[in-house]
Image (spheres, coloured by chain):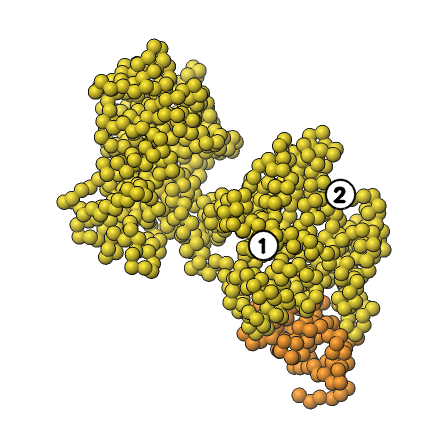
Chain colours: A orange, B yellow
Amino acid sequence: MTETTNNWLAACRVEDAVENGGVCVKHGEEQIALFYFTRRNEWYATQNECPHKKQMALSRGMIGSITDEPKVACPFHKKTFSLNTGECLSGDECAIKTYPVKVENGTVYVGINPKS
Amino acid sequence: MKEPQIIVIGNGMVGYKFCEKLRSKTSSFNLIVFGEEPRRAYDRVHLSEYFNGKTADDLSLSTENWYQEQNITLFLNNPVVKIDREQQKVYTGNGLDYTYDILVFATGSGAFVPNIPGIEKEGVFVYRTIEDLDLISTYAKKAKTASVIGGGLLGLEAAKALIDLGIEKTNIIEFAPRLMPRQIDAAGSDMLKSKLTDLGLQIHLNKNTANIEGEGKITALKFSDDTSLEADMLVISAGIKPRDELAKACGIEVGARGGIVVDEKMQTSDPAIFAIGECALFEGMIYGLVAPGYEMAEVLATNLCAGNKSFSSFDMSTKLKLIGIDVASFGDNFITEPDCRTIIFENKHKGVYKRINVSNDGQYLLGGILIGDASAYNMLLQTAINKIALPEDPEELILGSRGGGEPAGAGITSLPDNALICSCEGVSKGDICASVTDGGCENIDDVKKCTKAGTGCGGCMPMVKDLLNHTLKSQGKYIKNVICEHFNYSRQELYDLIHIHELKSYDEVLTALGENDGCEVCKPLVSSILASLWNEMILKKGNDVAQDSNDRFLANIQKGGSYSVVPRIPGGEITPEKLIVIGEVAKKYNLYTKITGGQRIDLFGAHLNDLPVIWEELIAAGFESGHAYGKGLRTVKSCVGSTWCRFGLHDSVSFAIRIEERYRGIRAPHKFKSAVSGCIRECAEAQSKDFGIIATEKGWNLYVCGNGGSKPQHALLLATDLDSETCIKYIDRFLMFYIRTADPLTRTATWLNKMEGGIDYLRNVIVNDSLGMAKQWEHEIEKLISSYKCEWKEAVENPAIRKRFSHFVNAPEEKDPSIEFVEMRGQKRTAEWKIV
């Protein structure tokens, strides 16, 4: 993965993020869900829209893990998605976009060129 | 073409069952039924329950409209008096005649009345119909001593009825040297006799009644051994006599000792005439039990619909509870050595006698007798009928395994699929299991409805329950006890552990008791337990992200991503001023308004960002959270009661408000609802609630565990005529018991359905404090009640929490632009799902 500083969106300060939960980041017309998985000391970002019923909701979902795979559950119908790969873990044929995240000097950045 | 006409004479249990079975197979045939009694067929097996409070309606086998719905013409109080076989006609008591193509005798039996001098005297009764019972019960009021002639099954039932009627001294007179001579042996009879004597019954065996003494009415019985016995009344229960008089009169073949002779197709000597039930004589035998009668009905109904079934000799095993004493016999109960080997267990201290007869090679169980403890009856019966190989030590079948470990015996799993579980309705093990695996039945009521198993005498119910549970378990359908991969505990265990360790946040609980990172199953569950235990603000201590979405934002998320706002309106009572505030808030924030089923007002379509300001305005006007989003108390619905209603007995609104304010904010395994009605008209629909209260002349009746929803269930009466304080005390205990023990997301109705012992057990726990927990629970709920705070008030006043009510972290003032509304009937509604 090549990183160019231009592609990093400054999303929020670390203290604005929700510990062990998500916030929604506005990026033009796009909405990105940003998760601070404090328990694992990991950051994840995905699209905010749940593909199941096209609801802007994933940032309000509960996060957790299945075996060791970090996941988020949509608050609407509890479809779960891998935070690593975006793959739907509830047996549906839909996946979500994921984004890289980095933290520098207390600011959280989301890489807006999505991983393939 | 005209439908062939079937006339059924007799509207007893078997006659009714024949109609039911025929109509379940075909709608053809004109079906006409003549009954001599004034009421529809009723459950004669449980007749004695008429004396402990069951009504004639309770005992009725059908609903009032059933016959009409099934297109059956029913004449009650209208006996057939004559049959003309040449013309194929029956004549009724009121002079009318009807033509038949097929005639079915289901005339049953009457009481056999021995020819004792004086039998016609006043105070002598038989025990057969509801009318007999009414007569007995009236006469019993002025009687102090009573006797029953007949120490068989019916005689003992009658004696029990006399005890229930308050007769001080009841005697049982039996001609044979032992009680229940058809079912039990001498040793069993001795045991039964000593138990009955303990209960205050006098048993006289080997007694031949010679005369009934008294001037006009009975005063004493005189026996052939010249002894005598005082008696103010006498009930004859000396056996049954088939009702074959009509058949005899029209020249059909009857047996020398009574009974209409039938072949294996239930056909009489006249090919157009059939007989079923206790009036039928098959291979020289009258079958005086309901199960073989039902089987006869099945045979006939099947054959009339072009099927081919035959009746063969029927298993006459019985199990019953006589005055609280188990008595059972099965298979070949009287076979003796050297034709078999007999194992006998007797415990006079406990009043238990068990005998099993085992084949000489020790392979099979042939039959047996159980007195005092018949819990093994179903298993033993199945082991005998299905010729299941016996364990090495067959004694373990009646003694239990004494080597520790699993109890011996075959267990339901070893039964073959064709094992007949419910002999009344002819339901096999395979039928019951299939109703679960293929029919989707998940509880005992489903299985009863689907297979009819257990709807006859009910004796097979324990076995049906075991089969249901076993099949559910084998399908993995049983509620998993372990919460999820992160917690290796049941909810109840976790509840106690969190309590003991005084854990206050989800993270602490996960670290102390769980593993890994948690998930959407354990997070809300633990949060709910934390709230139930400590009642702290649910969005503090990092618990906000462990709440289900509705709890996390203290509002219900709706289609499209907007939220709804429901202020509490206790008891549904609201002032005009507060109504105006709701209207103004709705207008200001462009909210859709609707009255809810729980007598309050729901405001829909709020943006996440607007929730705090909306609530600020509502709180300023005196509103508080309605917890419509939480698993806790929703509403306490009420009717206006005695304040306005001309029928109202008490002030139901004030009581509803008191209840709602008492339990508001308390979280439980699932939501719970309540209602208070001011009189029995029940306008508040309290019997559909988790707990419901109905005013009576003397106080309040408390109902529990009702439910609306997809599987409506009436609440059951827990206690009657309570004063307000006791009523509240019982609700306190009830709620704490539910909160502590229910499985996750289980409503009170399902909780009760799964509870062993059902409402009786629950009543014992709540009213009689059988677990000794009442004081602790009352203390615990007081703590919850006194720590109540409106969580919306806390949310809007706490900047850290309030900050979470914005959609974009990097644009806190902006609302979610993806939310769309459309107009409908002058208000807004949410746009349809963008995908279906």
Q: Is residue B742 left or right of residue A60?
A: left
Q: Is residue B472 left or right of residue B330?
A: right
Q: Is residue B58 left or right of residue B212?
A: right
Residue A83: percent from left, percent from top: 63, 75
Residues indicated by labels 2 and 1 sit on the same polypeptide chain: yes
Which residue occupies the extreme left position in the image? B338
Identity, as a three-letter code, of the amino acid under mark 2: Glu
Q: Could you say which quadrant of the image residue B17 lies in?
A: top left
Could you tell which of marks 2 and 1 lies nearer the N-terminus? 2
Instruction: Note whether A90 is above or below B437 in the view shown.
Output: below
Residue B449: percent from left, percent from top: 47, 44
* Residue designated by label 2: B573
Instruction: Note whether B620 is above or below B717 in the view shown.
Output: below
Q: Is residue B312 left or right of residue B824?
A: left
Q: Residues within 10 Å of mark 1 (few under 14, many from 20)?
A: many
Identity, as a three-letter code, of the amino acid under mark 1: Ile
- Image disc number at residue B824: none
Element under disc 1? helix
Look at the image and tell me whether residue B621 can be seen: yes
Residue B338: percent from left, percent from top: 14, 45
Instruction: Note whether B586 is above or below B173 in the view shown.
Output: below
